[in-house]
Amino acid sequence: MARASYLARTGKSLLLGAQLILVGCTAGREASRLENSTPALMRVKCLITTRGTSARCHVLQTVPEVEARIVTALSMRRSEAFVHRGRPAWVDYTFNIQVQPSDFKALPKNMYATWEKKTSGETEEQKTDAELRQLASFLCRHQLLDFPATSRLPAGVDPSLLIRREDLLFLWRQPFLAPFTELDRRDLHEDVAHFVSCEATEVRVSGDTAVVSLRRSSPNWDALPLDLLDSEEVLAPRALTDRLQALQRWAEMHPARGEPSVHSLAFVKSSEGWFADYHLPEKAHPAAP
């Protein structure tokens, strides 16, 4: 934590290093532009919040073939917050990601699972449970429980890695159906998500379908005053943390009250993994009895 202390003392932006080696696998896909399997470096800068979530990830150096998957993985990643003088601190963190194999397109959809240290004795059921809990909690925090409003996801996150194709196609053809609130502007959903807590309490798997039960707790965002939404800190922040810190101050003054709300989110499995299933086409055109 010495580096976090340095940040607090100097007020300077601090770049820390992390490295993820993506182990290669080939799946009969076309060969990559890197025929000699030389590792490629991707660098992504994120703000690690006081809750340990990654915010405002920005690609500094890309590997185009895997950019969407890596940004999605980083956005879903949660870790312990950096601590300075006993309190969580905001820290800039640059991930140096060494990508290898020669075939980038063979990387699995659920590569974000590689962030967690897995035990050698973990069963497929345990892996499935962990993947579904992580997916459901992420979608819950970004207020995608009832509808796949993809504009609420962080920039760079690929919704096709999270939501089934049929729902995305339905929404693409009928975008006017997406709900709209005061938070659906100026990337506010991306930022308020870091003050929302979502706990996956139960995972029920039946063949290629699953349902995850969740408990959600958050400040009453409907009570956000318009003067805060229209303030310079929110509209045109001078620093990356200004808006988040303004929202944090408001959230601390207006904590969640009462019992957490209870929700459920359905998933379906395909050859590429688990995807959230909102049943949009089925609800619009129900099958005849």
Image: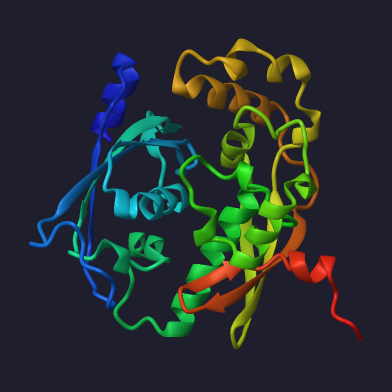
Q: Is residue 204 visible?
A: no
Residue shown at the point (40%, 51%) measured from the top left: 68
Find residue 106 and report its horizontal and vertical position in percent: 30, 69
Taking depth in this image into account, of 115 and 56 the one nearest to the observer is 56
Taking depth in this image into account, of 132 and 184 the one nearest to the observer is 184
Occupied quadrant, residue 163: bottom right
Is residue 124 shown above or below 225?
Answer: below
The quarter of the rendered structure image containing the N terminus is: top left
Residue shown at the point (77%, 19%) measured from the top left: 226
Residue shown at the point (66%, 68%) measured from the top left: 277
The quarter of the rendered structure image containing the C terminus is: bottom right
Left or right: where 8 falls relative to 261: left
Left or right: where 47 falls relative to 145: left
Taking depth in this image into account, of 227 and 168 the one nearest to the observer is 168
Find residue 250 and report its horizontal and vertical position in percent: 67, 25
Taking depth in this image into account, of 79 and 277 the one nearest to the observer is 277
Q: Is residue 154 visible?
A: yes
Find residue 67 and report its horizontal and vertical position in percent: 35, 49
